[in-house]
């Protein structure tokens, strides 16, 4: 079924690209508006659709015991363009799904440009659309242009909410000292394209770790403008020096944890480890895992070359910060992601208060799904709350702990990654294995997660079958 009046989607990031694909796949004409490369952002480098500006990792691909991997699997079953491109461009990364940035963006861009119902318009939308655009998805992401941000703020009447998202450095492979750094995934774990030896590991002794932390704390940081000074960080993407400020051992229990990594020179776990993950298909670039930073560039090179194995490191990209904005979605959006004050507008992606690549794409998927249903006159139901897709939607449109009528709600709603805590608990949590052995500790937790994941995939399959049947009528 096709209709003549298009859905307009503003922003061709992960969410906008996914929304466009889903709407067009339902037979709806789409105009996808992207201001790049006509107007660039502080973080983007290309005009490609779905460009990845931070990490190249989509995180864990294990659907059985990891909520992110579960969301991957749900999106694959739903026909996600983002997951198709990620699987095409995947790189070795242990149990994670990492991609070649260029191949990934190219795959998304080419698919969108080739679709007969999608028109890619390379121009900036600087204000709220005129009423004739009666079905619009705003998916401009955390780097929404100032003009459009101002227009949205006037509509919502809300105080602006923002946080800083930090970018990790990328290093040239041939500048890494492989006499010190060794290849190993944590506990030798394999993944979608992995071998069990997918990370480069740089070990630190106790003394080297202490000197490194001292340098982090003393290093000169980027200055913030006055209006940025009180902007909070997102806890899932803290700069390493901010983590260090919270306690000298914090990094050893975060991005520098050594567990499951055996230094071949000693046969033991080091005191601390810096991991590098492959960043492109050629294997010529490797990023510092979890090493987002706000240190000045000159300081970064000096401090990071203190790490054993990186004494002569050459950086293809140094770390940095960009400012992200998001809506107070529980108060402003309805259960179909429509703006309550102007229902012809939907919002998708990080701007709605989700954090992470696949989470952003997932909200784009849902926005495209709902918008297509409106256009063909067949309103679509939301996925069950027992699924990762449904749990994310529920969190940002009504599952937040603070009442949406609470005066303090705008200050308490924060971005959220998918996690099992967003899904309804099991009616009966497992206590024994199928063989009758009593489950304890982590083993019980893994069994519980697997059952929740199996429940989610069953429910998403039923929902998808129903949704496709409704769309086909």
Image (cartoon, helix red, strand yellow):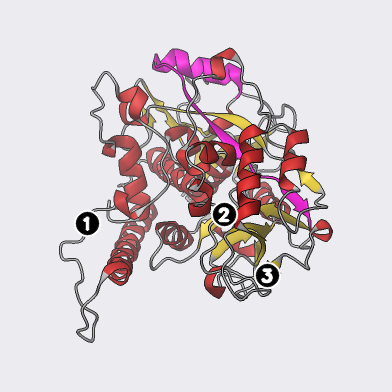
Quarter containing the C terminus: bottom left
Vertical arrangement, residue 377 with respect to residue 358, above or below: above
Depth check: give the residue in front, 288 or 387: 288
Disc sitting over residue 256 in the figure:
2
Residue 158 placement (x, y as % from top left): 39, 17
Rendered residue at 65%/42% (across/down): 53
The tag earlier along the polypeptide, 1 or 2, is 2
Mark 1: secondary structure: loop
The answer to whether residue 25 is magenta is no
Q: How far apart are marks 1 and 3 (CA)?
A: 39 Å
Rendered residue at 62%/40% (across/down): 214
Residue 78 placement (x, y as % from top left): 44, 58
Give the magenta range: 145-172
The answer to whether residue 157 is magenta is yes
Badge 3 crowding class, 10 Å Cα cut-off, few under 14, some 14 to 19, many 20 or more, is: many
In this rendering, would 348 be left or right of 410? Answer: right
Depth check: give the residue in front, 55 or 229: 229
Res 178 quadrant in image: bottom right
Vertical arrangement, residue 167 with respect to residue 267, above or below: above
Residue 439 placement (x, y as % from top left): 24, 75
Res 342 quadrant in image: top left
């Amino acid at each position: 079924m096709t209709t003549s009046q298009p859905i307009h989607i503003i922003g061709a990031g992960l969410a906008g690209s996914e929304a466009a694909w889903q709407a067009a796949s339902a037979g709806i004409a789409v105009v996808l508006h992207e201001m790049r490369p006509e107007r660039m952002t502080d973080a983007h480098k290309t005009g490609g659709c779905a460009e990845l500006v931070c990490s190249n990792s989509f995180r864990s691909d294990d659907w059985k015991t990891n909520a992110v991997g579960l969301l991957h699997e749900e999106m694959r079953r739903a026909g996600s363009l983002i997951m198709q491109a990620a699987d095409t461009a995947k790189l070795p990364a242990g149990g994670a799904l990492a991609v070649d940035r260029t191949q990934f963006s190219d795959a998304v861009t080419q698919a969108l440009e080739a679709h007969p119902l999608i028109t890619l318009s390379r121009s900036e939308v600087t204000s709220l659309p005129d009423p004739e655009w009666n079905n619009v998805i705003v998916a401009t992401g955390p780097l929404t242009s100032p003009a459009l941000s101002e227009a949205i703020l006037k509509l919502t009447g809300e105080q602006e909410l923002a946080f800083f998202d930090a970018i990790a450095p990328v290093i040239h492979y041939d500048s890494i000292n492989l006499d010190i750094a060794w290849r190993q995934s944590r506990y030798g774990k394999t993944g979608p394209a992995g071998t069990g030896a997918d990370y480069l590991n740089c070990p630190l002794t106790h003394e080297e770790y202490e000197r490194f932390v001292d340098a982090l704390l003393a290093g000169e940081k980027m200055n913030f403008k006055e209006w940025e000074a009180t902007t909070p960080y997102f806890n899932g993407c803290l700069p390493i020096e901010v983590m260090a400020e919270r306690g000298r051992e914090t990094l050893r229990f975060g991005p520098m944890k050594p567990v499951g990594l055996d230094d071949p020179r000693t046969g033991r776990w080091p005191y601390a480890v810096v991991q590098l993950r492959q960043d492109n298909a050629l294997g010529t670039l490797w990023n510092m895992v979890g090493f987002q930073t706000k240190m000045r560039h000159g300081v970064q090179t000096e401090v990071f070359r203190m790490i054993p194995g990186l004494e002569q490191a050459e950086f293809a990209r140094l770390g940095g910060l960009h400012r992200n904005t998001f809506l107070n979605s529980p108060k402003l959006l309805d259960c179909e992601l429509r703006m309550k004050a102007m229902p012809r507008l939907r919002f998708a992606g990080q701007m709605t208060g989700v954090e992470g690549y696949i989470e952003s794409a997932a909200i784009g998927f849902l926005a495209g799904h709902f918008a297509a249903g409106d256009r063909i006159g067949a309103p679509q139901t939301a996925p069950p709350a027992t699924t990762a897709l449904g749990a994310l939607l529920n969190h940002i449109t009504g599952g937040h702990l603070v009442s949406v009528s609470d005066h303090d709600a705008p200050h308490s709603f924060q971005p959220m990654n998918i996690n099992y805590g967003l899904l309804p608990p099991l009616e009966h949590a497992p206590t024994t294995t199928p063989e009758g052995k009593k489950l304890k500790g982590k083993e019980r937790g893994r069994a519980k997660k697997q059952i929740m994941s199996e429940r989610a995939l069953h429910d998403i399959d039923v929902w998808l079958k129903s949704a496709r049947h409704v769309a086909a009528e």
